[in-house]
Amino acid sequence: MQTVTSHTFGEGGASLPRKTTARGTAYFEAGDGETLILIHGVGMRLEAWAPQIEAFAKTHRVFALDMPGHGASEKIPAGSTVRDYVAWFGCFLEDLSIARASIAGHSMGAIISGGAVATFSDRITRVAYLNGVYRRDAAAKAAVLARAEAIRKNGVDAEGPLERWFGEDPESQRARELTRTWLEMVDPEGYAIAYAAFAGGDEIYADCWPSVECPALFLTGSGDPNSTPEMAKQMASVTPKGWARIVDGHRHMVNLTAPEIVNALMSEWLTSREKPR
C-alpha cells in the first residue's frame, strides 16, 4: 500500500498521511478497537472529519476515506450513481478485509452509508446519517438538479456551498475558510461526477429504513436548509432503532462548527444497542 505525501492548508489545517488500496481508495487509519468508518460529502476530503478522528481514535479503529475523485482517491466513471459509490465502499471493506464496522457519513457520505446498510446489512454494526437528504420535495429537487447542471457546465463554485453551509457567526469562520480551501482543491471532474450522483440519490435507498435493524443516528443542524431537521425526524420515525438529534444554531457542516456536541452524540450512538430513551 502506498502512502501519499502530506501537505498543509488553511490555518493550521494539516493534511493527514494516506494509504491507498489496490483499487485506488485513499484513506487514513488511526487507533484500535471496534472499527468506525467515516465518509465525507461532495467537495470535501477526509480531513473534514478531523475533530471526530481525534476523538474516536482513542477508543476505536478509525478509517476516514477520500470519496472517489476527492482527496487522493481515484475517480469513478462519469455517469456513476449512488449505487456505484456504495459498490466502491463495499470494495473498500473487501480490500481491507473488514468483516463488520460502524459507518458514519456526512451529506453524500450519509447517502452512501444508507446504501451500505441497505446492501450489506450483515457487515454494518450501526449507521450514523449526518446532514443527509431524504425524499427532497419538488422545489429542492429542481434546485439540486440545476446546481448539478451548472457544475457540469461551469465547474466548481465555492461560494454557493459556503453560503448554504455556514452562518455568519464568528465561531464558524475558521471552519468556513478550511472548507473553502477544500472546495478549491477538489478535482473538478470528480466533483461533478459525485454531485450528479448526489443530486439524483435522495430516493434510491429511501425505502430501506424500516428494514434496518442496527442502531441508526440521524443528525443535522437546525439551520441546514437542504438536509433538514424534518428529514432526519422522518427517517428516524420509520427506522426501528433510529433516533434524530438536531444541533440548534448550526447548519450543514455541523461536525466542524459544533464538534464537541457532535462527538458527544456520536459517542452515544457508538455505545447504544437500542434506541436511546
Image (cartoon, helix red, strand yellow):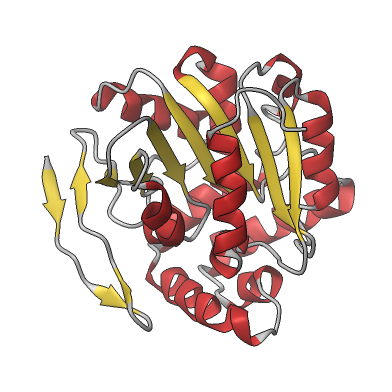
Residue under the image location 75 percent in, 35 percent down: 243
Residue under the image location 84 percent in, 36 percent down: 234
**Of 63 and 186, which appears nearest the observer?**
63
Against 243, residue 133 (above or below) is below
Q: Does 268 sit left or right of 210 as displayed?
A: left
**Residue ranking furthest to the left:** 2
Against 157, residue 199 (above or below) is above
Q: Is residue 197 visible?
A: no
Against 80, residue 68 (above or below) is below
**Residue ranking furthest to the bottom:** 170
Residue 220 placement (x, y as % from top left): 71, 53
Which quarter of the image is occupied by the C terminus?
A: top right
Q: Does 242 sit left or right of 60 as displayed?
A: right
Which quarter of the image is occupied by the N terminus?
A: top left
Q: Does 17 sit left or right of 201 as displayed?
A: left
Residue 153 placement (x, y as % from top left): 56, 64
Q: Does 52 sit left or right of 165 as displayed?
A: left
Q: Is residue 7 visible?
A: yes
Residue under the image location 79 percent in, 53 percent down: 228
Residue under the image location 38 percent in, 61 percent down: 47
